[in-house]
Image: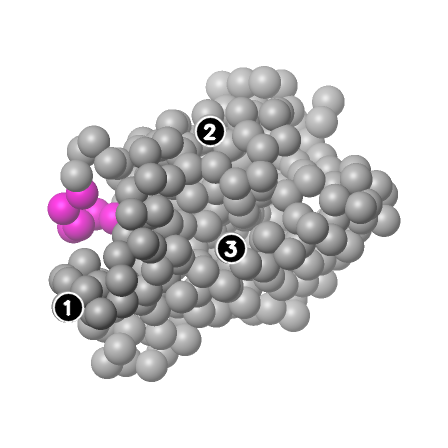
């Protein structure tokens, strides 16, 4: 059976994606920082879906170690989904450099280190799909989350270029922009229900995008037009707005 690697497997969205692929009979590879949590998720998937499931511990902010880990992980997955991320308030990140540094390290630098390692191996094999979970926050800098948004903007551009490079090597890259998601990471935030996706909605969108070889998707279609409108607001007006 084909294999899917879930990077950042401890999150709500990652677990939903793992379950969606397990339901399709895929062999599951889980990767995350918390070893105890990984083992619990692994056992649940094995029992519930009766598929082969393995796990590996890695820290997205430890670039050299994580890159080496996925340069050697066997077997090389058919689909690799980069789900991990880090979100703190913009105020905390502005006032405390370690928070800003972690936001950049996890959401961009760490993601690139892992995706590079996997991309090189898929390119050598001549097949595979890489999925990067980015964000609509990266489409225009806004005062409420521009540090997080800037890291996601960089990741989106990286995925664009990676898709272009890997296309000629028969490897596909999917960029996923979910919008708001109701997860533990967004607890405490007031999210508009109509604009907010569930982890399982994200998972179904990812599986569908991989199957249909889509390039960039918005989990809820109207986010594409919301962000188009936001990007079209003239800067002399936009800078006066509170978003």
Which is in the foreground here, disc 3 or disc 2? 3
Quarter holding the C terminus? bottom left
Q: Percent from the top left, x then y, of residue 46? A: 56, 25
User: Label 1: few (<14), some or many (≥20) within 10 Å?
Assistant: few
Seen at 50% across and 63% down, the residue is 154
Q: Which mark is residue 86?
A: none
Residue marked by disc 2: 205
Chief SS of the magenta region? loop
Quarter holding the N terminus? top right
Q: Percent from the top left, x then y, of residue 18? A: 52, 32
Q: Which residues are magenta?
A: 186-191
Seen at 24% across and 36% down, the residue is 195
The correct choice, above or below, for 6 with respect to 71 in the image is: above
Q: Which mark is residue 240?
A: 1
Left or right of residue 74, residue 160 in this image: left
Seen at 27% across and 62% down, the residue is 234
User: Label 3: few (<14), some or many (≥20) within 10 Å?
Assistant: many
Q: Is residue 69 visible?
A: no
User: Tags 3 and 2 in contact by the CB under 8 Å rule?
Assistant: no
Mark 2 residue element: helix
Q: Quadrant of residue 194?
A: top left
Left or right of residue 187, residue 121 in this image: right
Whichever of labels 2 and 1 marks the residue nearer the N terminus, that label is 2
Q: Nearer the viewer, residue 182 or 240?
A: 240
Residue marked by disc 3: 156
Q: Is residue 1 visible?
A: yes
Is 9 part of what is drawn in magenta?
A: no
């Amino acid at each position: 059976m084909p294999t899917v690697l879930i990077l950042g497997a401890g999150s709500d969205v990652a677990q939903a994606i793992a379950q969606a692929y397990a339901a399709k009979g895929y062999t599951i590879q889980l990767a995350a920082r918390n070893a105890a949590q990984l083992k619990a998720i692994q056992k649940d998937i094995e029992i519930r879906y009766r598929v082969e499931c393995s796990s590996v511990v890695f820290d997205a902010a430890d670039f050299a170690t994580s890159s080496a880990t996925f340069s050697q992980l066997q077997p090389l997955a058919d689909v690799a989904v980069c789900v991990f991320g880090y979100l703190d308030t913009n105020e905390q990140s502005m006032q405390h450099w370690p928070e800003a540094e972690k936001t950049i390290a996890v959401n961009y630098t760490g993601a690139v280190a892992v995706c590079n390692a996997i991309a090189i191996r898929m390119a050598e094999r001549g097949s595979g799909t890489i999925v990067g979970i980015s964000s609509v926050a990266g489409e225009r800098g806004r005062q409420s989350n521009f540090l997080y948004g800037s890291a996601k903007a960089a990741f989106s551009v990286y995925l664009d270029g990676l898709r272009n490079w890997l296309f000629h090597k028969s490897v596909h890259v999917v960029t996923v922009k979910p919008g708001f998601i109701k997860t533990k990471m967004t607890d405490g935030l007031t999210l508009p229900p109509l604009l907010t996706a569930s982890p399982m909605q994200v998972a179904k969108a990812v599986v569908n995008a991989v199957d249909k070889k889509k390039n960039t998707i918005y989990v809820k279609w109207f986010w594409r037009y919301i962000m188009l409108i936001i990007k079209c607001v003239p800067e002399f007006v936009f800078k006066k707005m509170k978003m």
